[in-house]
Image: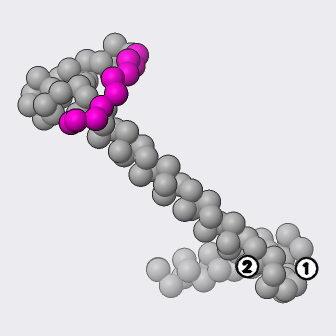
Amino acid sequence: MANVEKVSIALTPEIAAVVRQAVESGEYASNSEIVREALRDWKLKRTLQRQEVEEMRRLWNEGLHSGASRFAGMAEIKAEARRRLEAQSQQGA
């Protein structure tokens, strides 16, 4: 690794023990390797979360622009949800 920057992190004793055990068992070559993998996973998780939020925004806007609802209010929405749940339960039985 030619271009690296050293940083200091603080871990709880429990997490530090887990990290040490992973290195001692040979699962990882170093503490740094564990932290790098954890940060890659964290970065991927954040990317996926952002994509999910964008998808929800897209769906929300699509719903807003799709026209008036066929339901008059929340009571009708709940009744339809109950009807669908009951129909699904009967299909699975």
Q: Is residue 34 visible?
A: no
Q: Quadrant of residue 90?
A: bottom right
The answer to whether the residue labelled 1 contacts the one labelled 2, judged by CB atoms less than 8 Å apart, is no
Q: Is residue 31 magenta?
A: no
Q: Residue at x 56, y 56 (%)?
A: 50
Of labels 1 and 2, earlier in sequence is: 2
Q: Residue at x 61, y 68 (%)?
A: 55
- What x and y, as percent, mark residue 47? 49, 54
The N terminus, quarter of image:
top left
In the rendered image, the residue lying farthest to the top is 13
- What x and y, as percent, mark residue 76? 84, 77
Crowdedness near tag 2: few (<14), some (14–19) or many (≥20) residues, C-alpha within 10 Å: few
**Which mark, residue 72?**
1
Q: Quadrant of residue 24?
A: top left
Residue type for callout 2: Glu
For mark 2, what is the residue? 62
CA–CA distance in space, label 1 to label 2: 19 Å
Query: Which residues, given as a range, are shown in magenta?
Result: 1-10
Crowdedness near tag 1: few (<14), some (14–19) or many (≥20) residues, C-alpha within 10 Å: few
Along the viewing direction, whichever of 73 and 33 lies nearer the viewer: 33
Q: Is residue 3 magenta?
A: yes
Query: How many numbered callouts?
Result: 2
Residue type for callout 1: Ala
Predominant SS of the magenta segment:
loop
In the rendered image, the residue lying farthest to the left is 26
**Which mark, residue 46?**
none
